[in-house]
Amino acid sequence: FTANQVARPMRILPREARDIAGFNFDEEINIDSIMLEVDQLARSMDTMRVTIGNFFSLIKSLSGESDIDRLLDRVTDETMKASHADAAVIYLLADNETELNAQSPRFANREASGDTSLPALTLDGSSSNRLLDSFLNQEVVIEQLGKDQVGDHPLLSLRDALGAENLTAIVLPLTNRDNAGSGLLCLLYSERNQSLKNALSPEHIGFTQALSGFAAVSMESRQLLKMQKNLL
């Protein structure tokens, strides 16, 4: 009996690996093993399955979208969905490169209340916040907005719109093909979000960086295509 409990998961795991290699990401890997190492391997494989599946879903979703405004909304929605965030917003570098302009925030439950307009982030050195740090230093920033925080933080209105006491923002810099800064992607989590702990893990941060990098290049390609059409 004990030998079978050990051997059975080891027979299943190669089959699951073949499914992933064959781009089949639909079947959940659900293996309970009495051996800790086998159980950890099964969980890691299932995380890999979900991660790769989400990435391919985003590629498929964005590949057929040519309208830049709809593309922005879809990029935000799909990344928010894949990251299990409560809300997301993209900031884009203005044409004159003096500020970052917020696009319309997107919400997972689409029931946010109140004013959700966001101020531009000026790059002239007159202000300083963690979002600007992320853009200027091209690094991922994790920002905590507590219930007692007041002032002019650019994301405070989204904390209130979500009805959250505490808000965690994962801020990812967006870069173009030349690795120059082109904007920011902010993923927002309320204290009620059960995916928050996983969202802050290094593995998930790496996943969202890969997603945001692909999204940034997709948006740049569509913008270049639009500019070329306007010249014709």
Image (cartoon, rainbow, N blue to C red):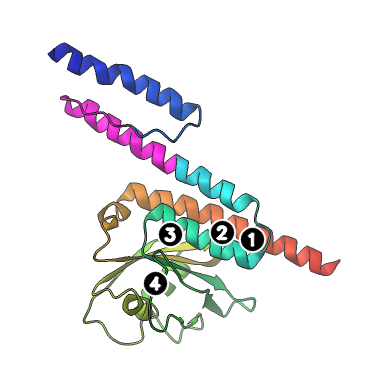
Asked if residue 178 shows in the view, the reply is no
Which residue is denoted by mark 1 in the rendering?
A: 220
- Give the extent of the magenta segment: 30-52
Of circles 3 and 4, the one toward us is: 4
Q: CA distance from mark 4 to mark 2?
A: 27 Å
Would you call the spot at circle 3 few (<14 residues within 10 Å), some (14-19), or many (20 or more)?
many
Is disc 2 placed on a helix, strand or loop? helix
In terms of sequence position, does the residue under pointer 1 or pointer 4 come before the other?
4
Of circles 1 and 3, the one toward us is: 3
Q: CA distance from mark 3 to mark 2?
A: 15 Å
Of circles 1 and 4, the one toward us is: 4
- Labelled pair 1, 3 in contact (Cβ < 8 Å): no
Which residue is denoted by mark 3 in the rendering?
A: 80
In terms of sequence position, does the residue under pointer 1 or pointer 3 come before the other?
3
Is disc 1 placed on a helix, strand or loop? helix
Question: Camera-side residue: 131 or 42?
Answer: 42
Q: CA distance from mark 3 to mark 4?
A: 15 Å
Would you call the spot at circle 4 few (<14 residues within 10 Å), some (14-19), or many (20 or more)?
few
Q: Disc 2 marks which amino acid?
A: Ala
- Labelled pair 3, 4 in contact (Cβ < 8 Å): no
Q: Disc 3 marks which amino acid?
A: Met
Q: Is residue 214 above or below residue 134?
A: above
Say the numbered circle drawn on residue 111.
Answer: 4
Q: Where residue 60 sits: x, y (%)?
A: 58, 46
Q: Dominant secondary structure of the magenta stretch?
A: helix
Please say whether residue 197 is one of the residues in the magenta stretch.
no
Q: CA distance from mark 1 to mark 3?
A: 20 Å
Q: Where residue 125 sits: x, y (%)?
A: 46, 83
Which residue is denoted by mark 2 in the rendering?
A: 216
Q: Disc 1 marks which amino acid?
A: Glu
